[in-house]
Amino acid sequence: MSNYLIIVESPTKSKTIEKFLGKNYTVKASMGHLRDLPKSTMGVDIENDFEPKYVNIRGKGDMIKELKKLAKEADKVYLATDPDREGEAISWHLAYLLGLDANDLCRIEFNEITKTRVSEAVKHPRKIDMPMVEAQQARRILDRVVGYELSPLLWRKIRKGLSAGRVQSVAVKIVADRDREIADFVPEEYWTIKAKLREEPKSPIFTADVTKYKNKKLVLHNEAEAKKAYDDLANASYVVTKSERKDKKQHAYPPFTTSTLQQAANRRLGFAAKKTMNIAQQLYEGVSIGRSTTGLITYMRTDSVRLANEAVASIRDFVAEKFGSEYLPAKPNFYNTSKSAQDAHEAIRPTDVTRTPESIAQYLRPDQLRLYTLIWNRTVQCQMADAIYDSTVLTIGANGYELRASGQVLKFPGYLALTKNLNTSEDDAEGEEELKNKVPYVEVGKELVLHKLQEAEQHFTEPPAHYTEATLVKELETKGIGRPSTFASTIQTIMDRGYVEKEQKKLLITDLGIITNDFLTDNFPNLIDIPFSAFMEGKLDEIAESKEERVPLLHSFYEPFHKAVTTALEKYPKVDIPLEVSDVPCEKCGAMMVYRESKFGRFLACPNFPACRNTKNILNKIGVVCPKCGGDLIEKKTRTGKTFYACDHYPECDFNSWDKPLNENCELCGSLLVEHYDLRRRKHKYCLNPDCKNCRPLPRVKSEQSDSSAKKPAKARGSRKTTSTKRKTRL
């Protein structure tokens, strides 16, 4: 019997696949890359056409030895890394280490980790796709050259420890430009008037907006203009001049791509992009469902909205059985993939649509279930019939003014029936006001009854909103910056470097981010120019499609870039970053301490360094007294960024809690109450006394349900049940 070796990237994937195949198959994980450019040097021979100098990654020696041994013993080796450029490059490196010929049929790939797909992939191996490897190498070399030449420049001109990148610097610029636009925004005053109208004296009331005056758009700039319009309308007759009634169809959203999944998970579940991708990876690689292990979703790094024909057929069968034929469109719904998409894989979908979220909820962790539910709902809805609204629009004349009243009533739920959300679509609340405004159909020429003319309301124009992770991901994709598979790591990097900080959900540029962005903009306009960055991404795509060659592209980029680095090094003066002085005196020398930055965040330091080396943590008091010693409770973070709460008298007082303490006490025993999230993400008030059984739910509001920064108790992540003895959590 032949002996086969299959090499994948992760151990979870290897365990899942091993259960699908026979005893003559050995499945091992490489744990990602085994070869890469060295960390201590650039590792690129610029003079020799940018030839990369790969080395075995430190700490991977035992893994390489084991794989070489298994490869020698095997009759055939299959490389089953992820089906993307990075995975193709890992297979290429594995082939080099194991002495395999890249032109042999040694590469297998599958878009979903199910027994059917894996077995089919083993029957149809292919060669390693060298154009994809070339594209990955070009990207890696570009990023290495930029990092190794630009980062030392930032160290000398701004501050040590900074970094710059071809994609991350553009992302910082996008956030900086938006924040500058908000800061420079000058609000403009305007007023609006609404009328409450009826068809008959006792008919239902509906609302109409005053929109025009003498056939021109009405803009009321101040109170005087608003008062005149109000007086004109107060005694006017209201006559219907135009009446429209029609069915309005609302089409389901397309299935998820990588970027739209990140956006939806951020908006609806409060997940950061990095968290979304981590959980999606778990669902893709395999989850134990009873006695079997299988992948629950298809590959999560994709820019296509295309679904396989067999998947569409199974979804349509499910919809017909679950809801009936009226919820099934006559033909399958198809969605257009963007022109810039590679379309290498189908959209993200469940591997088996009959595996509903309810049927597997007991096998998934809470966050896994929430993300799987989001993917499953979107996939099923995309093949359901349109929602149909009965839409009515009235145009009303009144003393030279024109009013508009619009409303709609859900006539047929269509795809909305799946989530029982019959008022709005799953992803936005567009048309919500129209659903609340019940506008009757009135014949043209009919005079309406004025119930009430609302007082004119003053408004001010608002600046554009700060970026969130969801909107930044959308902007990066729209502008063609980077690739969807890199968005999560890019956003995490610019936050880790201190260029951008997250406040609630908003991404805000820091002072360091502004200084660095201005420096790069002045000296490297092409590097962080959005059209140029999109152009480079297009060129990398062309390499993957064998339309462009790696070396000429690298030469065309490097020569002007290196010249700009040399010029900036010689001519640009060192930037003096002004120190932010605090109101905290140094207890050792009396000087007012200043704010400094480290990789763990901000801290207080004495300005007389190195003569005085005193430092202190910044205390973020939450306004609650410590129940043990009466000190102030403060918000702190672990080295991995998790938030907890502790007494500022530490180490004399050891009080700490993962749950946020509240400034109120239990009515039963008098102990301190804390906010606590259960496994279903419901917020409760719990008593810290483990012997007290007092707990009650907090009022649920929308912001609480979608807040990703809500603090979760450590014990909830690994347990299936909660008991009163586990309410008190400690570090």
Image: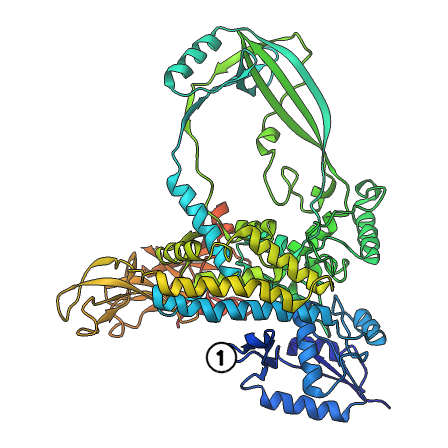
Q: Residue furthest left?
A: 590
Q: Nearer the viewer, residue 707 or 164?
A: 164
Give the vertical position of 589 relative to 68 (above or below).
Answer: above
Q: Residue at x 44, y 54 (%)?
A: 521
Left or right: 59 in relation to 423: left
Give the vertical position of 684 relative to 136 (above or below).
Answer: above
Give the vertical position of 93 relative to 407 (above or below).
Answer: below
Q: Secondary structure at mark 1?
A: loop
Residue labelled with disc 1: 41
Left or right: 535 in relation to 705: right
Residue 691 horizontal/vertical position (percent): 40, 67
Tally of numbered tags: 1
Left or right: 409 in relation to 721: right
Q: Nearer the viewer, residue 366 or 457?
A: 457
Query: For the residue marked with disc 1, what is the amino acid?
Result: Thr
Q: Residue at x 36, y 56 (%)?
A: 515
Q: Check the image and tell me how it is coloured.
A: rainbow
